[in-house]
Image (cartoon, grey):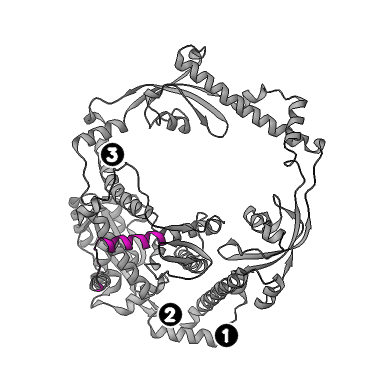
Amino acid sequence: MLSKIRDKLSTWVIGVLLLLIAVPLIFMGLGNYQSSQESYAFKINDQVISLSQLEQEVFQYRQALEKNFQGNLPPIYTTKFIRNVTVDYMLRTILLDQASRSSGLVFHNESILNTIYSTSSFRDDGGFNKEKYLSQLYQIGMNTSSYERYIYQKGITGQLQDSITNTAFLTKTEKSDLIKFRHHKRNVSYLIHDYNEIKDDINLSEQDLRDEYNNNLDIYRSPVYAKYLYLDIDKNDLIKNIKITDVQAKRIYDSNLDEGLYVSPITYKLNHVIFDTEKTANVALRALKSGEGFDKVAVEYSTDTETLENKGYLGEFILADLPDYLSSIVVNLGTGKISDIIKSNKGFHIIYIIDQISDAVNSFEDLKETIIKDYKKETGTREYFDIIDSMTEMNFTKKYRLTELADKFNIKTIKSKFISKDEGHGIFDYEFVRDGIFTDDVINDSKTSDLIYLNGDRFIIAELDDFMDSKQLSYEDSREIIEALVLNQKTNAAIILHSENVRDDLNAGISDQFDNLSSFVGTIDSSDIDEKIKQLFFAVGPSNGFVTKKLGSKDYIIFGVNEIIYPEDIKNIENAEDYYNFAYNTRSESEFNSFYGLFRSSAEINMNDDYMSRD
């Protein structure tokens, strides 16, 4: 089977494979994403993912993130970012499952159960504890089916990855060449042409401006203006309006209590010290057992910064929050006991349980607000997705007026001010919203727009209410715009022509610019030159002669690589082995990524780009 898989691999390229695997994504697993919805997020081979399905996955991911970050999501977790991560994960999940199956890999139910039963977070002194299992899943917002799908997907994908990465290798010649190339120097001569200096030398005539106006009259017109009636559906508003009584909340509590979901795990209050060597750890252990305190031992023997700052106090934790090498000891240690020396890849540890708070059932009063909040969020979210599906289906035929949709879903119509294709206000500030309502269907045929998503929690649907057509602008009204446009055009043409002429003269050896060339000699790690310029220098070989490249948005650079200087002996290169290990690990990951890329490239994937590009 390995040879069959490796036959599918093409030549590899050294690169870094960065996989964003957020823990909250495990709830997705490999679900049944088959759907017949007309309104889709993406299609992959014979499977269709509807907008509502994707939004539900995004909603669950956001919920898990909010729990992890205690409601304070970092700025990077925008709706668009979460949506893209979710889609990437779903695509990868489906494709790798198909690749695994086609390669004959299997991951049996028994393997799933063994994985769950052997997980330390789900065990106590008596072995696997079902109530503890359910409680741990509840804390991260998962059910058992989702977690089992995650275990299955992780197992079968791991088999596929191991079958490829475990067979990767680098020859001695490849090792030497890679290290030499990584640490080579370049001798470069270069010259920068400043856009603004070229611009200052450009002269515009009145005839240039009038020719631009007369030749492009259609450009110089006033915008089209329109007013719209629209419906604004916000999931958060629906959630706020959901009603739930205390009696309903208590019924939910009792139901979940029967399933063991409200059991708080045991909390341990711990002392902890870590040492670089086992010898030091043994000396410290004898001191502790003779009665010396953790604070004194930490200061006297440990070199770990955190240990020193906290004077041996680790804090309060549940087992799931501790690494396996500590949790496996804590669960059997007992309060007031000092552990033996624990070895890990971090060093040598000694721990002591100061106190522990037994597992207990959270009361209804303690959980009431959370239950109500979760119920409103879940019910409001379902209502939101139901509206999306129903309104999408009704709006697909374009037979219903906006007022009919408003009556059907009991939503108030809103009237906009006049807006143009290029400028709006409020929710119409967004270009993608204006693109969705300035269409032939809406403007010329008086039909309703498609559903336009402002984000994952809100969308609008609009209909034309009033219209003002475009008018021709006079030359005087357009003059300021014309000057800026013509000046930009002439400057761009001039800097390109000037840069190319200098490049050609330098390559021919007839340029008068040789004395004005700057020099760079250094490696890819050099910090005495702009990073963008340096990246260009290391992307071109000496056989290219002088080349011209755009530098940033306006300036141009002309440069030539005079010489590449390789190190004579890689043994004298500091950290050369570290780079070799990086290269080897990267190669094995790259081969797996190459295999996945080949499989993905052969799949039929159709993305709803308009939807995916929304903020």
Q: Position of residue 18 (x, y in %)?
A: 37, 50
Residue 136 visible in image: yes
The part of the image, by quadrant, that contains residue 158 is bottom left
Q: Amino acid at mark 2?
A: Asn
Residue 293 visible in image: no
Please give the range of residues in magenta.
89-109
- The quarter of the image holding the C terminus is bottom right
Q: Earlier in the sequence, mark 2 or mark 1?
A: 1
Do the CB atoms of the residues marked 2 and 1 lie less than 8 Å apart? no
Q: Nearer the viewer, mark 3 or mark 1?
A: 3
Q: Amino acid at mark 1?
A: Thr
Q: Which residue is mark 1?
A: 245
Q: Nearer the viewer, residue 570 or 453?
A: 453
Q: Earlier in the sequence, mark 3 or mark 2?
A: 2
Instruction: Judge from the rendering whether residue 142 lies leftward or rightward of residue 575; answer left or right.
Output: right
Q: Nearer the viewer, mark 3 or mark 2?
A: 3
Using the numbered discs, state the Cα–Cα distance from disc 3 to disc 1 in whole angstroms. Answer: 62 Å
Q: Which residue is mark 2?
A: 362
Name the residue rendered at 67%, 65% in the picture.
448
Q: Nearer the viewer, mark 2 or mark 1?
A: 1
Q: Earlier in the sequence, mark 3 or mark 1?
A: 1
> Mark 1 Cα within 10 Å, few/some/many (few <14, many 20+)?
few
